[in-house]
Image: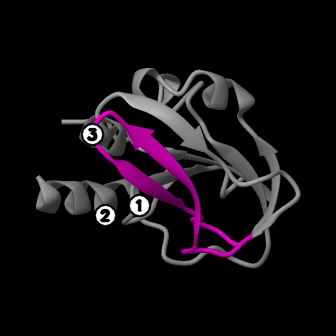
Amino acid sequence: MSSIPEELSYTKEHEWVAGIDDGLTVTVGITAYAAESLGDVVYVQLPEAGSTVEAGDAVGEVESTKSVSDIYAPVTGEVVEINQVVVDDPSLVNSDPYGEGWLFRVRIEGTPEDLLTPEEYATVTSAES
């Protein structure tokens, strides 16, 4: 089973969010569970820096040797940075999903809703297994 870091928040669509408690900007990635389910990631399309994203909207794609999956914005706000390293080397999504494999950063607007605790996310993944 995939690890589920305790310091992160999660979505039912398998994104993770770091920095919710730290202030206005959060980091977004996909979980190890999602990366394992996808298989070898070969392409990542991210939203453009400066674009506005709405929580729940599809904002990019992750393509693997098995399938293509949408990336959903877990929060509403402005994309302030994308991880060009992961665009250039999509395999980082598989090898280090919670570290070098992060996807983008968002300056959030309002209070994020519908984020899951690690325990709630563990329940989601166990139900899907």
Considering every residue shown, the one lying at the far right of the view is: 50
Residue drawn where x is 36% and y is 38% of the image: 35
Where is mark 1, residue-wise? Answer: 117
In this view, 25 is above or below 78: above
Residue stretch in magenta? 53-76
In this view, 95 is above or below 60: above
Check if mark 2's residue and mark 1's residue have beta carbons within 8 Å. Answer: yes
Where is mark 2, residue-wise? Answer: 120
Judge whether residue 35 can be spotted in this image. Answer: yes
> Is residue 120 a member of the stretch shown in magenta?
no
Check if mark 2's residue and mark 3's residue have beta carbons within 8 Å. Answer: no
Q: Nearer the viewer, mark 2 or mark 3?
A: 3
For label 2, count other residues whose C-alpha is less than 10 Å away and answer few (under 14), some (14-19) or many (20+). Answer: some
Residue drawn where x is 47% and y is 23% of the image: 91
Q: Secondary structure at mark 1?
A: loop
Q: Where residue 66 is drawn, which disc sits there?
A: 3
Image quadrant of residue 40? Answer: top left
Q: Amino acid at mark 3?
A: Lys
Label 2, label 1: how far apart the Cα atoms are: 5 Å
Q: Nearer the viewer, residue 125 or 34?
A: 34
